[in-house]
Image (cartoon, rainbow, N blue to C red):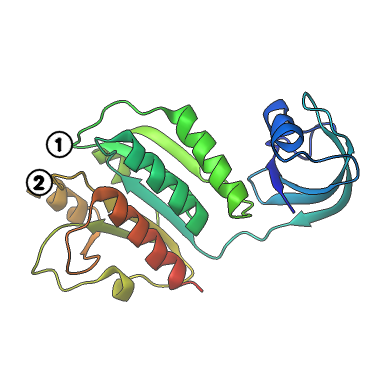
Amino acid sequence: MPLFYHPNLLQSPNVLPEEESRHAVRTLRLKSSDAIAITDGKGSRIDAMIVEANPEGCTYTITRKVKIETPSYSIHLAIAPTKQRDRMEWMVEKIVELGVHRISFFQCRNSERLKINANRLEKIAISAMKQSQRSWLPEIETNLNFDQLLQTDEEQKFIAFVDSSNPYHLKDEAKPDTSYLMLIGPEGDFTQNELAKALDSGFKKVSLGPYRLRTETAGLAACSIFNLINQ
């Protein structure tokens, strides 16, 4: 059953937003009486049946309401944006499919990209949420600095740092059923001063394995590990 996104699902008439309506009618060629599912990205979801397949406003009738339980854990990935935009967009798509609850792009000393198209990233996240049949759309922040991230209140806070002598692997340090913040630096990594500030703020330096990963690959690996230990 195809899944659609309606941010005001429970507060508005039974009409899909115009962009979703066009996708349903013109791309998927859905017709009256076809079954669909709709989520607001905040844990609410309905099963529905199309009444009028109008590409400007596809109407539907609700057949079942579903409330998706809040997960027992939350993943906050904070990452320095990559120089190449497509790598960053690819990462957002994949970590939303895997499961992530908040994504923060931040600037630090070795950052390589200053401007981020937040609207484009949100569209990618919505598409990935629908593709993976999820009902939670992650919050995406695009204009933070490194010091702001040090003040967040997740229960477990980690910083990935390229250090061959670091014996602590994320999979061994992360505990299930809690909230996580993972800091991933740019291709030039964090500076020693940034690392020291993070450690002083309660972060734990961790490894993601013996090999040097690209920034976007490190973000994907971290989200995979957090999800796996909560299965």
Per the rendering, the mark at residue 109 is 1
Residue contact between numbered discs 2 and 1, judged by CB atoms under 8 Å: yes
> What amino acid type should be assigned to the residue bearing mark 2?
Asn
Q: Which of 146/184 is in front?
A: 184
User: Residues under labels 2 and 1: Cα distance?
Assistant: 10 Å
Image coordinates for residue 6, horizontal then vertical, percent: 70, 37
Task: Examine the image and state in which quarter residue 154 appears.
Answer: bottom left
Residue at figure coordinates x 25%, y 49% from the top left:
215
* Nearer-N-terminus badge (2/1): 1
Task: Examine the image and state in which quarter residue 18 appears.
Answer: top right
Per the rendering, the mark at residue 193 is 2
Image coordinates for residue 96, horizontal then vertical, percent: 49, 51
Q: Report if residue 70 is visible in the image.
A: yes
Per the rendering, the mark at residue 223 is none
* Image quadrant containing the N terminus: bottom right
Residue at figure coordinates x 72%, y 30% from the top left:
22
